[in-house]
Amino acid sequence: MELFKGLYSFEIILMVLGIIFFLVLVFMLIYLITKGKEFKQMVFFFLFPVVMIGFPGIKKISYDNGKIEIERETSKLLANPNDKAVRENLSVKVRNFESRASKDPTALVSLANANIALGDTAKARESVKKAVKINPKMILSKELVNRMHGR
């Protein structure tokens, strides 16, 4: 599912439990209002599910931004291959992003492109193989395989 792409399983569980907790609180609030009971103390508890749902959302945004940053840095490095600062910056971003991208074929292709720009074709091949395994019909990965084999 696209919504959960790039999230670890504990982040998905946290989000789902946050949604369930929020719904329970809403039903409790409706119950207290219909019975005419005091509900002001309960408002504080709405902060917990908001944080539980928001944390994975923030991680998802940082995941998508990480993918974009890697693509941008790869373009910079390809434009100026002798720039050591860009090379080091891209290398750090690739290392930080690799574990999150293991199930997203587009992210794996971005990593493969970055590794090619860095000169690490073995890691690039590994990323492409994973991307093709996840989505064999993906055009980007097929193009990258052809480019790596010189076709």
Image (cartoon, grey):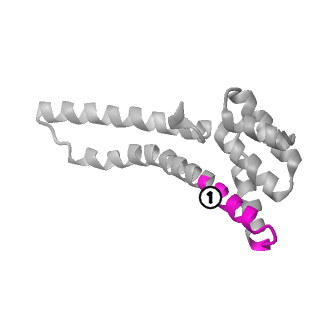
Identified by mark 1, the residue type is: Glu
| Residue drawn 82% across the image and 58% down it | 118
Magenta residues, start to end: 68-85
| Residue drawn 51% across the image and 51% down it | 61
Secondary structure under tag 1 reads helix
Q: Nearer the viewer, residue 139 or 128?
A: 139
Q: Nearer the viewer, residue 80 or 129?
A: 80
Question: What residue does disc 1 label?
Answer: 69
**Residue 129 pos. (x, y %):** 80, 34
Left or right position of 37 against 22: left
Position above or below: 130 against 41: above
Q: Main secondary structure of the magenta part?
A: helix
Left or right position of 134 against 126: left
**Residue 125 pos. (x, y %):** 84, 41
Position above or below: 60 against 36: below
Residue 69 part of the magenta-drawn span = yes
Left or right position of 25 against 127: left
Left or right position of 42 against 140: left
| Quadrant of res 81 | bottom right
Q: How many marks?
A: 1
Q: Nearer the viewer, residue 69 or 145?
A: 145
Bin the neighbour count of mark 1 within 10 Å (Cα to Cα): few under 14, some 14-19, many 20 and up. Answer: some
| Residue drawn 43% across the image and 49% down it | 51
Residue 84 part of the magenta-drawn span = yes
| Residue drawn 44% across the image and 48% down it | 54
Quadrant into which the C terminus falls: top right
